Image: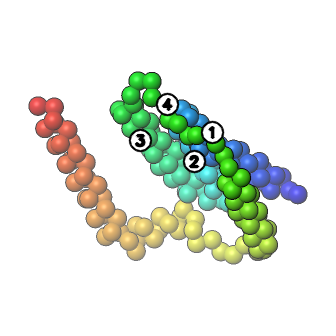
Amino acid sequence: MSLDVIAFAVTSAIMLLAAIGVIKFKEIVRAALMLFFVFTLVGVLFLFMEAEFLAIIQVLVYAGAVVILVLFAIMLTRREGAVGYLGERVGVLKPVTVLALISALFYFVFRIGWFAPKGELHGTTKFLGQELFTKYILQFELLAILLLAAMIASIYLVRREVR
């Protein structure tokens, strides 16, 4: 096994443990922290696949914005002393089903020949930038105007509530 495969496997295992932590932690802030780790490690997996742009977007949008949004929602809606209940009773069917699904996943993942020779990459950041600012410039500008309108509307609504 090469060092790349070992690093990929270790990162995937840590990500899987963090995902289990999202489900198992009773305290919602700790679950949100585990969610942050999962999203960040997905970005690391994108780096392993040489998709730097997707890795940066993953970390900025998901690990940054979504987790901050979840934490703000928690802080604004939190009741004192409230702790979620996840239940301690685990039957036989759930672990067997999870084990069967994970086994099927590993079977199909390792059965497919993933390591095909590399072709020309059209998904690079340079290619994306060229396409975005030449072929799709009108859509890009319309999206910018839409986001500006949303920002102005939100500022108007917040200022109206303050008065």
Say which of marks 1 and 3 sits in front: 1
Q: Which residue is mark 1?
A: 88
Q: Is residue 135 above or below residue 43?
A: below
Q: CA distance from mark 4 to mark 1?
A: 14 Å
Q: CA distance from mark 1 to mark 3?
A: 29 Å
- Disc 1, SS: loop
Does the CB distance between marks 4 and 2 fall below 8 Å? no
Residue 83, which numbered label? 4
Q: Is residue 122 above or below residue 163?
A: below
Amino acid of disc 1? Glu
Amino acid of disc 3? Leu
Identify the mark nearer the N-term, 4 or 2.
2
Identify the mark nearer the N-term, 3 or 2.
2
Q: Is residue 113 visible?
A: yes
Q: Which residue is mark 3?
A: 69
Q: Is residue 102 above or below residue 122?
A: above
Residue 39, which numbered label? 2
Does the CB distance between marks 4 and 1 fall below 8 Å? no
Identify the mark nearer the N-term, 4 or 1.
4
Say which of marks 4 and 1 sits in front: 1
Residue 152, which numbered label? none
Q: What residue lies at 39% left-to-right and 30% top-to-bottom? A: 78
- Where is residue 56 drawn, in percent x and y? 54, 51
Q: CA distance from mark 1 to mark 2?
A: 27 Å
Amino acid of disc 4? Val
